[in-house]
Amino acid sequence: MILSSAHTAENRSATGVRIATAGWSIPRAVAKAFPPEGSGLERYASRFDAVEINSTFYRPHRPTTYARWAAATPPDFRFSVKLPKAITHEARLIGCQDQVAAFRAEAGQLGHKLGPLLVQLPPSLVFSASAHERVFAGLRGVWPDPVVLEPRHASWFDPDAEALLRAYHIARVAADPAPHPDASRPGGWPGVAYWRLHGSPRMYYSTYDDRAQAALADHLRSDEPRETWCVFDNTAAGAAAANALELQVLIGSR
């Protein structure tokens, strides 16, 4: 069930879960659930209180752009930002403290609306306790805000990696599809839970059916009290917005 545009931000989940999509595109199939007027971001923010900025992975944005986005959204709205691939995939996190600091200065124009930093690792990046302790120490030197990590190599799900993430207050993303059995639930630092739903079985395309949505809602409702994000990344065929609206109803009906 998708509510009409008359159900605005006042109907967001009362559970404290931020339900969002990767980007704020509004597909035609669910357009009637949003107000007809305003920019795309303004219309999106009338129904959701968070969004994941995925475009930062591919290209930089001017500080004035971040400031404009912040000004276009309600006071309780939050943006998560994805660390650029030049840092995560090309440099593989090594020697990037200056680049991270520059990115922090740009995204920092979001002000208090800046949410978690999303660090998605390439599938081939193997965990190294010594190397990644230096990386995380450098990251934390310039990024004091919440950080969530989406690792995709099995080595990141060992106890040593878990301990290092906790030591540096870095949460591990719960991902679907899960590249490792432990990847299906949040891990690392327990202060933040961040779910990224890419679509299954076909990543970025598949929608989540009623059964999957009900199971997800149960997980989110039963989770311990903490900052929780649930981001739908199955955007390629427009399923993300519909799934996010549906989950919003399920969570709100608690």
Image (cartoon, rainbow, N blue to C red):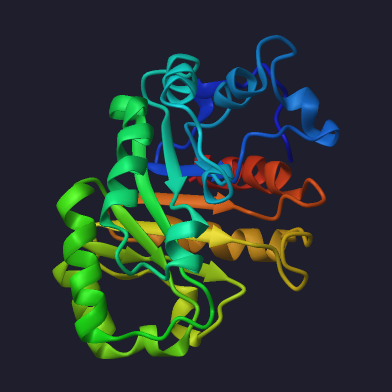
Query: Residue 198: which quarter of the image?
Result: bottom right
The x, y position of residue 190, in whole percent, is: 25, 64
Q: How many labels does the image show?
A: 0
Query: Residue 55: which quarter of the image?
Result: top right
- Is 14 on the left-hand or right-hand side of 168? right
The x, y position of residue 12, in whole percent, is: 50, 31
Residue at position x 42%, y 65% in the image: 173
- Is 137 on the left-hand or right-hand side of 162? left
Q: Quadrant of the N terminus?
A: top right
Residue at position x 34%, y 26% in the image: 109
The x, y position of residue 217, in whole percent, is: 53, 57
- Is 36 on the left-hand or right-hand side of 6? right
Judging depth in this view, the residue of 58 and 23 nearest the camera is 58
Judging depth in this view, the residue of 222 and 24 nearest the camera is 24
Query: Residue 45: which quarter of the image?
Result: top right
Judging depth in this view, the residue of 170 and 97 nearest the camera is 97
Q: Is residue 28 above or below residue 249?
A: above
Q: Is residue 97 above or below residue 125?
A: above
Residue at position x 27%, y 45% in the image: 101
Residue at position x 70%, y 55% in the image: 234
Q: In this view, does 57 lie above or below 33?
A: below
The x, y position of residue 3, in whole percent, is: 70, 30
- Is 226 on the left-hand or right-hand side of 55? left
Residue furthest out toward the top = 37
